Image (cartoon, grey):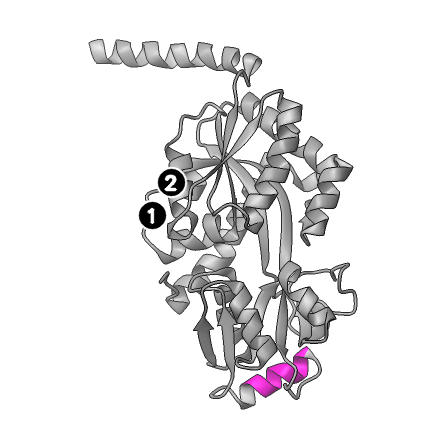
Amino acid sequence: MLAARIALFISLFAAAAFPALSQSYPSHPIALIVPFAAGGPTDTIARIMGERMGKSLGQPVLVENVTGAGGSIAVSKLARSAPDGYTIGIGHIGTHVIVEAIQPVQFDVLKDLDPVGLICSNPQLLIAKLATPANNLREYMEYVKANASKVTAGTGGAGTPAHVSAVYFQQKTGANFEIVHYRGAAPATQDVIAGHIDMNFDQTASSIPAYKAGKVKAFAVTAPKRVAAAPDVPTVDEAGMPGFYMSVWHGIWVPHGTPPAVIAKLNAAIVEALADPDVRRRLEDLGQDITPTDQQSPAALGAFHKAEIDKWWPLIKQAGIKSE
């Protein structure tokens, strides 16, 4: 009986406290957990967004870099944080979809986190060395099928989006070519340029400069529409591999149980930031496609996040992809 009364008291207190919290929120700085080191793409996006969101919220949004284990340490820390809106986290397909499928983790991204908003995305470019005899994707797929024992694809590491795309490409072509893991995407792309490996799926922000400089061939962008920075590169739909969509997208989450009014305030700050011309320019300079306004809501991120898990987990688990 005493335990039941205590539980009732706690629930009533929480119910009364949350509206007050929502009205006064935020009253002090907000921590934005970033799952990678300072200076990388995710960190840069977080700092651009955090700076502008802080203006809307009236409190600074301070980046906290929590690295390790493919981003799972940061996600775990966010999941264990108080659901009060003072600890939020940024992540992408690697940290919020792939990592839970390739290694043991102490969280469930769909149950332990609540979505706030989808920020931006960056599709991949399928690039190949210049000596490749094929001149379009259909020809290249035939070339890979005929030369599977000789073809090599680079990735930025086991369990990365590039690794998943390479496995997906194996399935699409039926060719069991070799996949070579590097310590980061840049060295993999450099070896495509040097002709040491045949191909790589790299983010457009990183691979388009090499293509424009005439150092690699580019067969397709893994998105339903062409990218403005390389309008002559066809989409996978146009090039002959329909539906092969892979994008490194970024979103923001909070611990599960964060009051809806707090989530609404955070989302409003995201929407305002993405409407700011300076923020848009800075994100576009990074090669990012800004999320359309009608897809910036918490519900939209929640639905998209689940759809990505439903799409990629079966492929990852069937292929036996594991982290290094």
Q: Is residue 14 above or below residue 279?
A: above
Return the mark for residue 105: 1
x and y, in percent, of residue 127 in the image:
63, 73
Return the mark for residue 76: 2
x and y, in percent, of residue 177 in the image:
48, 81
Residue at the (42%, 64%) spot, across then down = 158
Q: Amino acid at mark 1?
A: Val
Sequence-first disc among 2 and 1: 2
Q: Taking 234 as reference, is 113 left or right?
A: left
Q: Which residues are magenta?
A: 137-144
Q: Taking 100 as reference, is 93 left or right?
A: right
Q: Secondary structure at mark 1?
A: loop
Q: Amino acid at mark 2?
A: Ser
In this view of the protein, which residue sits in the foreground, 253 or 276?
A: 276
Residue at the (70%, 71%) spot, across then down = 211
Q: Are marks 2 and 1 in contact (CB under 8 Å)?
A: yes
Spatial separation of the CA atoms under disc 2 and disc 1: 8 Å
Alpha-carbon neighbours of circle 2 within 10 Å: few (<14), some, or many (≥20)? some
Q: Is residue 300 visible?
A: no
Quarter holding the N terminus? Answer: top left
In the image, is residue 140 part of the stretch drawn in magenta? Answer: yes
In this view of the protein, which residue sits in the foreground, 172 or 254?
A: 254
